[in-house]
Structure formats: C-alpha cells, structure tokens
Amino acid sequence: MADQDIESIKGIVDPIEGWLSGHEAELLYHSARCCTAKGVIVEIGSYKGKSTICLAKGSQRGKNIKIYAIDPHEGYTEYAGAKTPSNTFAEFSRNIEKARVADLIVPIVDTSRHAALSFHEPIELLFIDGSHEYSAVKEDFHDWVPKVIDGGMVVFHDTIGYEGPRRVVNELIYRSGQFKDIKLIDEITLAVKSKNITAADRLKNFNMLIVKKLSEGAVRIKIPKAIRGWGKKILKKAQD
C-alpha cells in the first residue's frame, strides 16, 4: 500500500512547478507520516505546493497533523530577459485544493523571520527550504530549530548544490552536538534533534559529513550523472 501511495503522490506533484526529486518527495511523505502528534509540521518555503502536498499526504496517512506552510509568495519571474513580480499564492492554493489536502494546511503568507516571532506551537517536523542565502538560512535555523521538540526532525533542502544551505548544515547539523540519525537523500539533509548525543552518534555524524563532502566534490568536478546516480543508490541503501 505504501508503494501505491508514493506513486499516487508523485502523479499529483510531478506536474507542479518546483524542485524536488522523487526520492526527496518520498522522504518528506514518510517523515510526515511518522510524526506522533507531539508537535506540528512547519515548512519554510512552499512556492507552489509541491513539497507541501508531500508532507500533507504523509500526515493524512499518519496522525493528521497540521502543516504550517510559510511563504511570502512574492518573487520574480524572468521572461524575455526581464524580471517581473510574481505572486504564487493563488496557484499554491489551487494545487493544495486539487490534491485534497487543504484542510490540513495552514498557509502563512509572510516572511520566515516575521512568522517566527508570533509562532509558539511545538514543532515535530521542520522543513527549511526558503531563501538560500547563507545569512537567511542561518537565520531560519536560529529562529525555528529551538521550537523543535526533543526527538523532532529538522530537514533542509538543497544542501549539496547551494552554498547557503550547504554551509549551514555542515556547521550546525553535522558538527553540532544537538542532532543524530543524520540522513542525506539527494539534496536533503535530515537530522533528529536530541538532548542525548553519545560518542557513537558524534562518530556517525562525522562519517556522514565525510560522505556529504564526497557528494559535494562529485558535483563540483562534474562526475557523470549515471555514476552519481549509482553512488546515490549505494548511499540510500546504506541508510535504510
């Protein structure tokens, strides 16, 4: 049944504009499905709802936990060499309605920083995929991670190919004494927040950082996609 769920969800989200691989969509779905309702789910950066729907579908199959989807929905679209203002909220709303998950989603049309000031719910799953500038990602970490419960999950997107998320997770996740059970799936880094980090956990984190650095190097030197794909399959199997 789980495989059928995943294929169904991919069929829903594949046509939606956004940046999420099949493995990443599956990870978000399973992470939301595993939540125990000790806290809510928060997404920083929703765009047109691709990742939001994956989280909501997982929640539907789990504990029906609310997803707070935070995005100012103001950006720019480049057309014929010119950038024009683009508001994505209407399309986001249509997509979550079409996917039949709107009842689980609480859209917050605001910046991450401003939303954090008035957000007081405990968080069990935090997905950060907002601005990719180093200072902004670091700000998201400091504004939102303290709200995550012990045993909750912290997930960052684009942690290989973008300097901001890459540096923040390398500095504040892999080298931190706050997280364990780190996973690297395509561009996503997932970690479990914990007050009890053992020496074995620190060693595993260090080993995962080495693996991540190898992945970063493979992208920089432009190793062929076929070989990178083979390496990703081995990494995924090792983390299962």
Image (cartoon, rainbow, N blue to C red):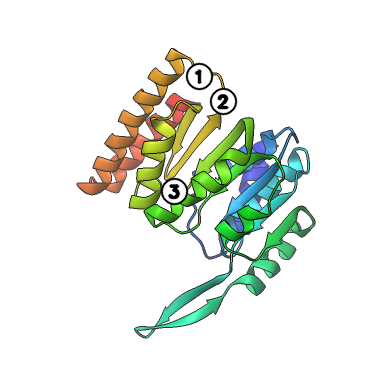
User: Label 1 crowding class (10 Å Cα cut-off): few <14, some 14-19, many 20+?
Assistant: some
Q: Which residue, given by chain and number where applicable, does mark 1 sit on?
A: 197
| Amino acid of disc 2 | Ser
Q: Which mark is residue 138?
A: 3
Picture residue at 63% right of the left edge, 43% below the top: 29
| Amino acid of disc 3 | Lys
Considering the numbered disc 1 on the image, is that residue within a helix, a strand or a loop?
A: loop
- Which quadrant would residue 90 be assigned to in this image? bottom right
First in sequence: mark 2 vs mark 3: 3
User: Label 3 crowding class (10 Å Cα cut-off): few <14, some 14-19, many 20+?
Assistant: some
How far across and down, in percent of the image, does residue 93 sit? 69, 68
- Along the line of sight, the residue nearer the viewer: 136 or 181: 136
Q: Residue furthest front?
A: 117
Q: Which mark is residue 168?
A: none
User: Label 2 crowding class (10 Å Cα cut-off): few <14, some 14-19, many 20+?
Assistant: some
| Amino acid of disc 1 | Ile
Q: Are marks 1 and 2 in contact (CB under 8 Å)?
A: yes
Q: Which residue, given by chain and number where applicable, does mark 2 sit on?
A: 194
Considering the numbered disc 2 on the image, is that residue within a helix, a strand or a loop?
A: loop
Picture residue at 29% right of the left edge, 42% below the top: 216
For the residues marked 1 and 2, what is the alpha-carbon distance in whole angstroms?
A: 6 Å
How far across and down, in percent of the image, does residue 51 sit? 58, 53
